Amino acid sequence: MFLFIKLKKRWLLHLLVTLPTLLSIIYFGFIAENIYTSEATYIIRSSDTQSSLGGLGTFFSKVGLSRSNDDSYVVLSYIKSRDALSSIEKLLPVKQWYTQKGDIIARFNGFNFDFMNKNEYFYRYMRDMITVNFDSSTGIATISVNAFDMQDAFNINENLLKQAEGFVNQINLRAKQDLITASLAELKNAELQMKKEANALSEFQKSKNKDANLAEYQQILINNTVAKQQFEAATLSLRNAQVEITKKQLYLERIEQPSVSDVSFKPARTYYTISTFIISLIIYGIVNLIIAGIREHKD
């Protein structure tokens, strides 16, 4: 009976500890492909706010520019969005890189399941391959792209930055259009009103009845003066809008260009192998406790 229990424990040990650890050694030691990481850093800056970023903050303050954290989060969301990935796929064979390169476990849909060959699943896969970290204290964002080829990682990172720059330009363009359109509409209405009042004054003066209709003439003069003032105010408003657009203009400033790493630090082979062994050992201990508890309950 004792020998049976001992053999049973050995079988459980090999199943829960030896086998997972051996598979981990085989995979990370002989199968897992290298993963290369390209990193780039940038900051979203504008000229209407003042803040401190240490050395960078001093530099940006000298040129009248500073970070804009609220807008940084918008750009971050775009970089991690489906739209950004779709734009990159139009320029680069991204899906091909991640389905044909790498090992069967790490690459996308390595087992070639039909139900996995969907854009949504690929987007979720790429969320793990592309990460964006943001330091709110400095306003600096870091894009990290993981790929099975160092040049692929660089190309994706470079194009992501270009897409982000284009997105920032779109934000500026929409803001400019909204502000200028409203100001131009106000100016046009003021101009029409001024012309209307000027015509009314001209017609009244032609009638040569200013003395007989002195009160009406005075009202027309007042209306004409008010219309001119409104036109001048609308003109000033348009100029202020143009200045405001310049002050609120956003810029994506590259701090560190996308890197080309010739050394692979992923996957962390030793770390994952040891982790597999430790976790397996913990599971083995828990299972043993459960079995001992069941056996004690039966006795």
Image (cartoon, grey):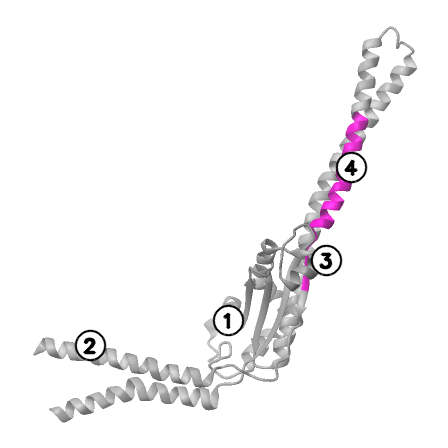
As drawn, which residue projects farthest toward the top? 212
* Cβ–Cβ under 8 Å for marks 4 and 3: no
Characterize the local packing of mark 4: few (<14), some (14-19) or many (20 or more) Cα atoms within 10 angstroms: some
Closer to us: 91 or 3: 3
Q: Which residue is mark 3?
A: 62
* Cβ–Cβ under 8 Å for marks 1 and 3: no
Note whether residue 298 is visible: yes
In-image side of 292 versus 136 (left or right):
left
Q: Residue flagged by tag 1: what amino acid is it?
A: Asp
In-image side of 136 versus 113 (left or right):
right
Magenta residues (range): 227-253
Residue at image point 89% right, 9% down: 209
Of mark 2 and mark 3, the one earlier in the sequence is 3
Q: Which mark is residue 236?
A: 4
Q: Separation of disc 4 and disc 2 at Cα?
A: 81 Å
Q: Main secondary structure of the magenta part?
A: helix
Closer to us: 50 or 140: 50
Q: Residue flagged by tag 4: what amino acid is it?
A: Leu
Q: Which of the image's four quarters has the N terminus?
A: bottom left
Q: Separation of disc 2 and disc 3 at Cα?
A: 67 Å
Q: Nearer the viewer, mark 4 or mark 3?
A: 3
Q: Which residue is mark 2?
A: 290
The image quarter in which residue 238 lies: top right
Q: Residue flagged by tag 3: what amino acid is it?
A: Lys
Closer to us: 59 or 20: 59
Q: Which mark is residue 128?
A: 1
